[in-house]
Amino acid sequence: NAQQIAVKCVVETMVGMLRSNIITLDVQPLIEMNSGQVLFIDFTEARNIFEGSDGSADAAGIVGFCSEMMALIPESLRDFTISYLKERVESVEMEGVVFGDAVKNVLESIWDD
């Protein structure tokens, strides 16, 4: 199903960026409707989560980034998305990646919503 493939692409990109401590508030996807493949373009506004002067995580930026990414997904696919998001986060954590508290709180708020 092309929609589910698109959801997986969005979730994988979101988790991959958070894993790398990168966010952007200017999410620009190109979605190939037949295959569901998603290509994100124009990362000129992307930044490190920890760019603040005090070295703390940009909690508002993380919320904004995750909100932008989740807004790409139709409500009808929410359950599928939440399930896949949990699966991807668990998989990344099993690889030894530790998400910071600010990121983990936002991710948990998505699936607890």
Image (tube, rainbow, N blue to C red):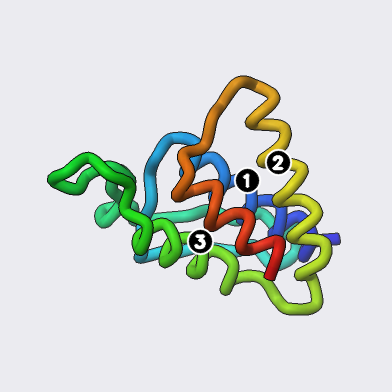
Residue that sits furthest to the right in the current view: 1
Residue at the disc numbered 3: 66
* Neighbourhood count class around disc 1 (C-alpha, 10 Å): few under 14, some 14–19, many 20 upward: some
Residue at the disc numbered 1: 12
Q: Nearer the viewer, mark 3 or mark 1?
A: 3
Q: As drawn, is 56 to the left or to the right of 99?
A: left
Identify whether 1 is placed above or below 55.
Answer: below
Q: Nearer the viewer, mark 1 or mark 2?
A: 2
Kind of residue sitting beneath label 2: Arg
Which disc is residue 40 wearing?
A: none
Residue at the disc numbered 2: 88
* Quadrant holding the C terminus: bottom right
Residue that sits furthest to the top in the current view: 96
Question: Toward the viewer: 43 or 52?
Answer: 52
Disc 1 or 2, which lies upstream in sequence?
1
Residue 1 in the image, given as x and y percentages of width and height? 86, 60
Kind of residue sitting beneath label 3: Cys
Q: As drawn, is 8 to the left or to the right of 60?
A: right
1 and 2 marks in contact (CB < 8 Å): yes
Residue 107 in the image, given as x and y percentages of width and height? 59, 54
